[in-house]
Image (tube, helix red, strand yellow):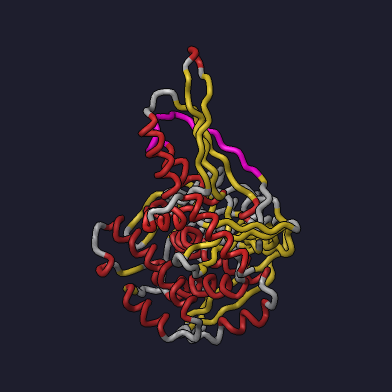
Amino acid sequence: MKTLYLDCGMGASGDMLTSALLEIHPDAKAALARLNELGLPGIKYQANGVQTCGISGTHTSVLVHGQEEDVEQENAGHSHSPAHSADTAEHHHHHTHTSMQDISQIVSHLDLPSCVKKDILAVYQLIAEAESTVHKVSVSEIHFHEVGSMDAVADVTAVCFLLHEIAPEKVLASPVRVGFGQVRCAHGIIPVPAPAAALLLTGVPTYAGDFAGEFCTPTGAALLKYFVSQFCGQPVMQVEKIGYGIGRKEFPAANCVRAFLGETESEENTVAELSCNLDDMTPEAIGFAEQSLLADGALDVFTVPIGMKKSRPGILLCCICQVSQIQQMVKSIFFHTTTLGIREKECSRYAMKRELQTVPTSLGTVHLKTADGFGIQKKKLEYEDISRIAHESQLPFLQVQKKLEKELDSKG
């Protein structure tokens, strides 16, 4: 599976994500030229080779009406001039207070596929909702300050466009460094991470780190929240390209976002097994929990009778799910059972390719499950269809099953 993994050990901002993605694009020069032809009013992108702690990478600047974006403005939050104090960094902007409607108008005129325009507006909707909550006003009343300036629009547009071009099947990221201290914005001095960024990162594993300053901007937080399906350690992957998106500010550590593009094992071949021991639930309650987990998307749920402490008979509840479903299933198990702890393990599995066909028969339409793989073919009629026909025709289940199987075999 084509996978993009983002190392956010030094946080994330729009310009750094843009730079990292440019480095792994199959034709960075053409991509940059395409960005400059999109039709963003007054915008020009420039990508330059720079270094951080001796590591070479790219920094992408945005020129707004011929002037480079202010190094102190929000979207380069931890990319300030080296001489600028990290914990009192000012958030200047171009005095452009842009509404969601203004941004929608700008995006609608861009020379981009509709799916990319949808992504851009969705990212800004996340920011608008966060700002709405922070300021306790409706989304329609939100007028973006730092994240509404044209250079931020350019960064969001660039990231959405480049991800569309690179087309990973899955986007993963590390836990995100957010920094600490204070920063000056349009409303005054606020804590780091900025309230909007902190809200956008709820549910995302974050940490302050040991350097003062803003490391994850609201723009960077919104882009991660929208595109990343899981925040985790780097998975086993066959890396094909690595991109370094470098910020301006110098730290003892390399100030960059790293993008790893490569192949990971198909998620279909790796599943998670979540299990817990239960000794204080009725059979009805356990059955309800099983059905609820299956309704939530579990691949399989089963129980095994076990002996527990104090010689109590108990039940081992096991839930098989996709790795991306782990958090959802853990929450569901805690909600529907009395357990106080859940065990997790990843399992590799061998799976045959399966299909569900709809076939006509003399007794009505039925569903036929087929499986193919490892030189073996299997087929099986759907139980619910046999059961339905048996009830409707007042015939024994086995008689209906044999008749249908014989009829399908004769058709080949």
Tell me if residue 301 comes above or below residue 127 in the rendering.
Answer: above
Tell me if residue 60 comes above or below residue 85 in the rendering.
Answer: below
On screen, residue 366 versus residue 354, left or right, reads left
Residue 41 position within the rendered picture, expressed as x and y whole percent measured from the top left: 45, 85
Looking at the image, which residue is at 58% across and 61% down?
A: 406
User: Looking at the image, how many numbered discs can be counted on the residues?
Assistant: 0
Q: Quadrant location of the C terminus? A: bottom right
Residue 343 colored in magenta in the image:
yes
Judged from this view, the residue extending furthest toward the top is 310
Please name whichever residue, 381 or 330, is drawn nearer the observer in this view of the structure: 381
Residue 393 colored in magenta in the image:
no
Quadrant assignment, res 290: top left
Q: Which residues are magenta?
A: 334-347
Please name whichever residue, 140 or 301, is drawn nearer the observer in this view of the structure: 301
On screen, residue 70 versus residue 131, left or right, reads right
Q: Is residue 197 visible?
A: no
On screen, residue 121 versus residue 262, left or right, reads left
Q: Is residue 139 visible?
A: yes
